[in-house]
Amino acid sequence: MEFEGKRIELVENLKKRGVLSNPKVINAMLTVPRHKFVPEAAQSSAYIDSPLSIGSGQTISAPHMNAMMCELLDLHEGDKVLEIGTGSGYHAALCAEIVAPKDSITPGHVYTIERHKELANNAKKALNETSYSTQVTVIHGDGTLGNKENAPFDKILVTASSPKKIPPPLMEQLKDNGILCIPAGSKEWGQDLYVIKKKGKHFETNKITGVRFVPLIGKFGFD
Ligand code: SAM
């Protein structure tokens, strides 16, 4: 089966499992070619609902996790998004497809930060090859510091697991009424996915489900 057929099958399965229902997220998952964001040897597995190794000891998350996080963020055209943990660049491309579709007259933008230089470079290449490089800026650095130059953000997603204390710069760099989606907990086991909404000086926190992510390493992350 061609990649497009496999992509449609994956999306149908995620819909049946109740993981995917937002039409904008469905469209993004049908549009972004996940196989172009994984190493060549793993391309045949790109549409299996599983994490895959992308080098530097890191993984691209399973598609159901990408879908769930995009839905929880309630992304809209025009949103300015910050992602911590670029990895392959796939999740950034999904966000870009929603906040800055090609025909948009009010396009948003995705800023994404990766601590491994090689992964940041590979992600830039994949985003360029799939025509998302104008909507996504890849930054090499410590994402626990956020990105002051481009703050505040409508939405922030973190795709590595934070300690229980959420990095303060991320809370500060969220717009009023903005949404932060972040896994947090212990370094190896026992993490939960949280949705945090900023309401003036207050934050509303909701625990969504148990998850397992690679650790967020940095000044406000793990050592
Ligand atoms: N979103 C990615 C994708 O679509 O492929 C998957 C991300 S992977 C599960 C988590 C990534 O977070 C890894 O690439 C890891 O190197 C990165 N990471 C961990 N701590 C970080 C930090 N402080 N700043 C930036 N990236 C970090």
Image (spheres, helix red, strand yellow):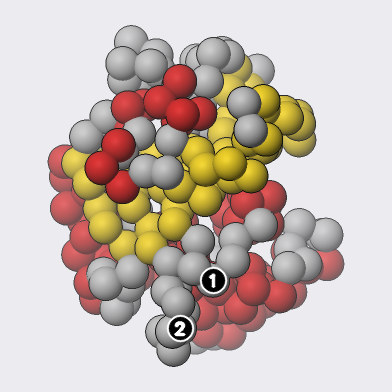
Q: Quadrant of residue 74?
A: bottom right
Determine the residue positioned at 63% across, 51% down.
73
Foreground of the two, 51 or 168: 168
Q: Are marks 2 and 1 in contact (CB under 8 Å)?
A: yes
Determine the residue positioned at 33% across, 69% down.
135
Amino acid type shown at disc 2: Ser
Instruction: Kindly state the secondary structure of the residue where label 1 is placed.
Output: loop
Residue 28, x across and y down, in percent: 55, 73
Foreground of the two, 118 or 153: 153
Instruction: Kindly state the secondary structure of the residue where label 2 is placed.
Output: loop
Determine the residue positioned at 43% across, 35% down.
173
Residues under labels 2 and 1: Cα distance? Answer: 8 Å
Q: Which residue is mark 2?
A: 104
- Residue 77, labelled with which disc? 1
Residue 200, x across and y down, in percent: 63, 33
107 shown above or below 223: below
Amino acid type shown at disc 1: Glu
How many residues crowd around disc 1 within 10 Å: few (fewer than 14), some, or many (20 or more)?
Answer: some
Residue 2, x across and y down, in percent: 49, 86
How many residues crowd around disc 2 within 10 Å: few (fewer than 14), some, or many (20 or more)?
Answer: few
